[in-house]
Image: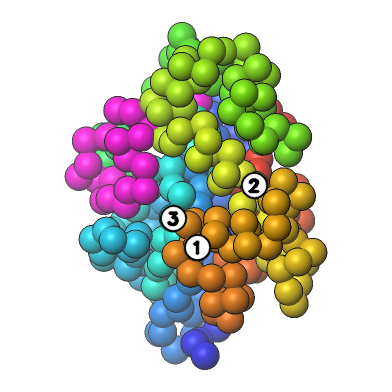
């Protein structure tokens, strides 16, 4: 067992001018007793910008280098878990939808997929280098900090020529009824070749892998939200059988469902429940591009 972590989180909606670019903006304060650190695993998600003041995390993706206590932790779209160790800290998190990636990041999402870097030094995140210093410059003030972040994005915002296509693919992707690349292309009114190119550049993965991730995350979110004692009731109906689900679980989390259920989830478990209660969705991959 590990120490406990108290979580205070507030969610903030993106302004109307940035509709479809972000999952949410959120301020979180993590308080870990006795100066300890807690361990947990982020699930597969969209790209994220996370700014820290305090005991920033030590984080790693399977097979990748460890990022230690960066004030600006940046991740591309992921299909793997990020293990992290976190102490008492204040954080602003920003989840980037594919349209947000298209507008604000430098380079194709696939090039940064399953990547974890110091955003202050990596060129793909150059639009936000030094922003942590500005956010946390004065005494903590949620509204002031939120306004700093929003104003920063609004100053960078420009129309994107692929906006309507990105939004159409995204809307189809989060529809549980869509479970094949053919369906996804049809809903977005794109050829499969055009769909592949668009997904590679702005979504980070192939359409097939994105659909697999959606199916998996629907199952994992159901399990986490309802504190189920077994996985059977949580498995998405698009899985052929339990063995099919277990294979996907190992592919996305690098462990079995049983091994994952046996772990402590001091941050993610509570965070998902609070996110679902306030925001209406437990995980950012399940958010619709238009609320």
**Label 3 element class:** loop
254 shown above or below 23: below
Tell me the quarter of the image containing the C terminus: top right
Residue 286 on image: x %, y %: 65, 43
Looking at the image, tell me whether mark 3 or mark 2 is earlier in sequence order: 3
Distance (Cα) linking label 3 and label 1: 10 Å
Callout 2–callout 1 Cβ contact below 8 Å: no
Q: Which of 240 and 206 is in front in this view?
A: 240
Where does the magenta region start and end?
99-124
Residue 171 showing in the rendered view: no
Disc 1 element: helix
Give the residue displayed 56% in from the left and 46% down from the top.
213
Mark linked to residue 215: 2
Q: How far apart are marks 3 and 2 (CA)?
A: 14 Å
* Residue placed under numbered mark 1 in the picture: 250
The label nearer to you, 3 versus 1, is 1
Name the element at disc 2: helix
* Residue identified by numbered label 3: 80
Q: Tell me the quarter of the picture where residue 242 sits.
A: bottom right
Tag 2: Cα neighbours inside 10 Å, few (<14), some, or many (≥20)? many
Above/below status of 45 relative to 81: above
Does 121 lie within the magenta span? yes
Q: Residue at the location (73% across, 38% down)? A: 176
Residue 97 is one of the magenta-drawn residues: no
Mark before the other along the chain sequence, 3 or 1 = 3
């Amino acid at each position: 067992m590990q120490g406990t972590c108290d979580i205070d989180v507030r969610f903030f909606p993106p302004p109307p001018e940035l509709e479809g670019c972000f999952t949410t903006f959120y301020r979180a304060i993590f308080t870990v007793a006795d100066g300890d650190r807690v361990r947990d695993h982020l699930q597969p998600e969209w790209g994220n910008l996370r700014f820290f003041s305090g005991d920033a995390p030590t984080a790693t993706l399977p097979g990748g280098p460890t990022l230690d206590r960066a004030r600006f932790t940046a991740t591309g779209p992921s299909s793997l878990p990020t293990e992290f160790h976190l102490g008492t800290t204040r954080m602003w998190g920003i989840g980037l939808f594919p349209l947000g990636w298209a507008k604000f990041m430098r380079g194709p999402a696939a090039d940064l997929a399953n990547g974890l870097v110091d955003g202050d030094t990596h060129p793909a995140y150059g639009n936000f280098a030094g922003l942590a210093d500005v956010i946390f410059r004065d005494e903590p003030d949620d509204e002031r900090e939120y306004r700093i972040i929003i104003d920063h994005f609004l100053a960078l915002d420009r129309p994107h020529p692929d906006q309507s296509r990105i939004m159409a693919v995204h809307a189809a992707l989060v529809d549980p009824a869509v479970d094949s690349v053919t369906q996804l292309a049809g809903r977005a009114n794109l050829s499969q070749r055009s769909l592949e190119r668009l997904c590679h550049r702005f979504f980070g993965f192939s359409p097939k892998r994105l659909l697999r991730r959606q199916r998996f995350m629907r199952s994992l979110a159901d399990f986490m939200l309802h504190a189920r004692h077994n996985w059977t009731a949580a498995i998405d109906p698009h899985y052929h059988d339990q063995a099919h689900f277990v294979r996907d679980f190992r592919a996305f989390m690098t462990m079995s469902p049983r091994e994952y259920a046996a772990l402590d989830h001091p941050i993610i478990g509570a965070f998902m429940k609070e996110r679902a209660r306030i925001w209406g969705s437990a995980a950012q991959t399940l958010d619709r591009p238009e609320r």
